[in-house]
Image: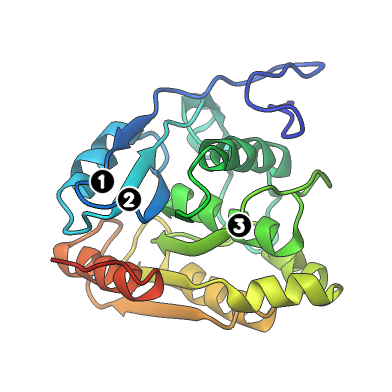
């Protein structure tokens, strides 16, 4: 199954199928525009639900872009079609990763960020499968290229992953260690990972393992927050953490 070709953008055709991305929701900054963050929803969701939550955060200097994933058959749902950034089966360290789907989604996200003003800081965040896609974006940024070899075009300044995991974790370290420039970019990229200890959908161990793999690959500017008793959802204290972290890492004018 083929997805969109990142070298030609989200409107291209491949030799087989393409998937159309859904509606994109934008939350405009209420103050001076200092940062733009693409926020990615989880499996079966859409950009609207997160845009409403993000609009309520005390971050007046951030523009939020909330795209909607393509509708596609998903293996973990027995092939049932729903919105998904890539195809996924059972979560396991040995399971196959849909790099074609990941590359297509990550290219779509990069396209959304590529038209932002040059003086605006750029980031990607997400929940669950959206967090996984954000972390894959981080590895593409560090390497300077997508999994298919095409150039990754965006300078990222922040990555946030809530209740997610790292796709392609087996190969990340080798890909980063093989390049001094990739190692430099990896070490300079701030990453915040948050995970609930009682997550029944993406078990806590996957958040913990993602942190260990990223650290070992050279992503040194990484914070991991455990939330005791939290399931596969977000809570106000977690979003407070996100606000404070973004305010500090992007040197914004304030979480008011």
**Label 2 packing within 10 angstroms: few (<14), some (14-19), many (20+):** some
Of all residues, the one furthest to the right in this rendering is 178
Q: Which residue is mark 1?
A: 29
Q: Could you tell me which secondary element the residue under label 2 belongs to?
A: loop
Relative depth, front residue between 124 and 75? 124
Residue 135: image location, x then y, percent: 56, 59
Q: What's the residue at 76%, 52% (across, down)?
A: 145
Q: Badge 2 is on which residue?
A: 33
Between residues 186 and 165, which one lies in front from this camera angle?
A: 186
Q: Is residue 196 visible?
A: no
What residue does disc 3 label? 155
Of badges 3 and 2, the one in the foreground is 2
Tell me whether circle 3 and circle 2 mark residues in contact (CB < 8 Å): no
Closer to us: 90 or 133: 133
Q: Is residue 194 visible?
A: yes
How many angstroms separate mark 3 from mark 2 (CA)?
17 Å
Q: What's the image's color scheme?
A: rainbow
Quote the CA–CA distance across marks 2 and 1: 6 Å
**Crowd class of label 3 (few under 14; some 14 to 19; many from 20; radius 10 Å):** some
């Amino acid at each position: 199954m083929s997805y969109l070709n990142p070298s030609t953008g989200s409107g291209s055709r491949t030799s087989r199928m393409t998937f159309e991305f859904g509606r994109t929701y934008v939350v405009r900054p209420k103050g001076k525009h200092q940062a733009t963050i693409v926020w990615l929803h989880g499996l079966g969701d859409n950009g609207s639900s997160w845009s409403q939550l993000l609009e309520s955060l005390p971050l007046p200097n951030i523009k939020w872009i909330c795209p909607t994933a393509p509708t596609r058959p998903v293996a973990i749902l027995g092939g049932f079609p729903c919105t998904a950034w890539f195809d996924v089966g059972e979560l396991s360290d040995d399971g196959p990763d849909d790099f074609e789907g990941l590359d297509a989604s990550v290219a779509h996200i990069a396209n959304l960020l590529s038209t932002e003003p040059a003086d605006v800081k750029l980031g990607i965040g997400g929940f669950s499968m959206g967090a996984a896609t954000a972390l894959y974006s981080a590895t593409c940024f560090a390497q300077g290229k997508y999994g298919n070899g095409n150039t990754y075009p965006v300078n990222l300044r922040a990555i946030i992953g809530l209740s997610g995991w790292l796709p392609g974790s087996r190969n990340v370290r080798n890909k980063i260690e093989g390049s001094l420039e990739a190692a430099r970019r990896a070490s300079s990229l701030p990453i915040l990972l948050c995970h609930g200890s009682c997550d029944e959908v993406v078990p806590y161990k996957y958040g913990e393992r993602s942190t260990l793999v990223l650290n070992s690959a050279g992503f040194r500017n990484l914070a991991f927050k455990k939330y005791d008793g939290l399931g596969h959802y977000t809570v106000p204290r977690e979003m407070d953490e996100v606000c404070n972290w973004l305010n500090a890492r992007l040197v914004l004018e304030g979480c008011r």
